[in-house]
Amino acid sequence: MLNEKYPFELPPLPYSYNALEPYIDEQTVFIHHNKHFKAYVDNLNNIISEYPQYQDMTLEEIIRCIPSLPPNIKSQVKNNAGGVFNHYLYFEIMGGNRSEPSQELEHMINCSYGSMERFKDTMKKAAMNIFGSGWAWLVVDRYGNFRIATTSNQDTVVMFDVFPVLNIDVWEHAYYLKYKNNRNEYIDAFLKIVDFNKVNDLYEKNI
Ligand code: MN3
């Protein structure tokens, strides 16, 4: 996704809309992917359509250029380009194929957090502590260390010098239909449906 250019397309959901049941319900996945995610793609295309100088840039290049964009489009590009990448990763790393981490990945997580359970607890605390809407991330820094990060709204870690391998959407639209205001239960459910094969692929791409 980061290498794609205008016009951006909504990536197809890599599994069926009901594949995450009972943890994330079909209606939530459908609306989240087909309405919310699509809106970020459409909005970004609408903005970029009027700025030919950004039409040959990749999504990553656009995100990295946000600080120097014209003030009248800066926040719209930030929200929508971030929204596109953040949702792409989120839908990628969940899955009907609820795999366990590879030995290598688990070893690295154990080295950083002690155990998978401690890692999940730390990730959950970070996600619970986000005030309002945002994202919690597992990223690999330039030294190959895992770090847990959070961002507000649709801010993305792509603008920092880290490589994301996992993210959790804690906007209420990600869980409100099923979990109402209970972010706690949603995060527990999310952590059960991460496809660690995909997290592992991302991790290996970076090391
Ligand atoms: Mn969302």
Image: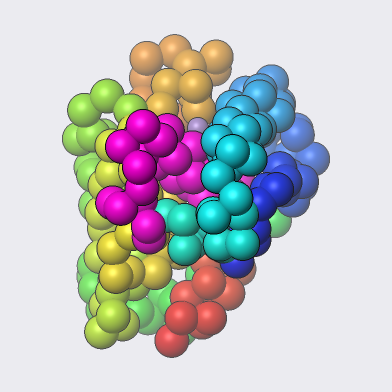
Q: Is residue 162 part of the magenta span, yes or no?
A: no
Q: Residue at x 50, y 28 (%)?
A: 174
Rendering colour mode: rainbow
Q: Residue at x 36, y 32 (%)?
A: 72
In this orientation, which residue lies closer to the viewer: 18 or 192? 18
Q: Quadrant of residue 45?
A: top right
For the image, the number of numbered tags is 0
Q: Dividing the image into 4 quarters, which one contains the N terminus?
A: bottom right
Q: Residue at x 61, y 62 (%)?
A: 56
Image x and y of residue 157, in percent: 34, 56
Q: In the rendered image of this protein, does residue 162 appear above or below residue 134? A: below
In the image, 182: left or right of 96?
left
Image x and y of residue 88, in percent: 58, 49
Report the span colored magenta. 64-91
Q: Examine the rendering and report whether any part of residue 179 can be seen.
A: no
Image x and y of residue 204, in percent: 51, 82
In this orientation, which residue lies closer to the viewer: 80 or 206? 80
Q: In the rendered image of this protein, does residue 205 appear above or below residue 118? A: below
Main SS category, magenta section: helix
Image x and y of residue 43, in percent: 58, 31
Q: Dividing the image into 4 quarters, which one contains the C terminus?
A: bottom left
Q: In the rendered image of this protein, does residue 205 appear above or below residue 152? A: below
Q: Quadrant of residue 64?
A: bottom left
Q: Examine the rendering and report whether any part of residue 142 can be seen.
A: yes
Q: Residue at x 37, y 19 (%)?
A: 182
Q: Quadrant of residue 162?
A: bottom left
In the image, 116: left or right of 5?
left
Q: Is residue 89 part of the magenta span, yes or no?
A: yes
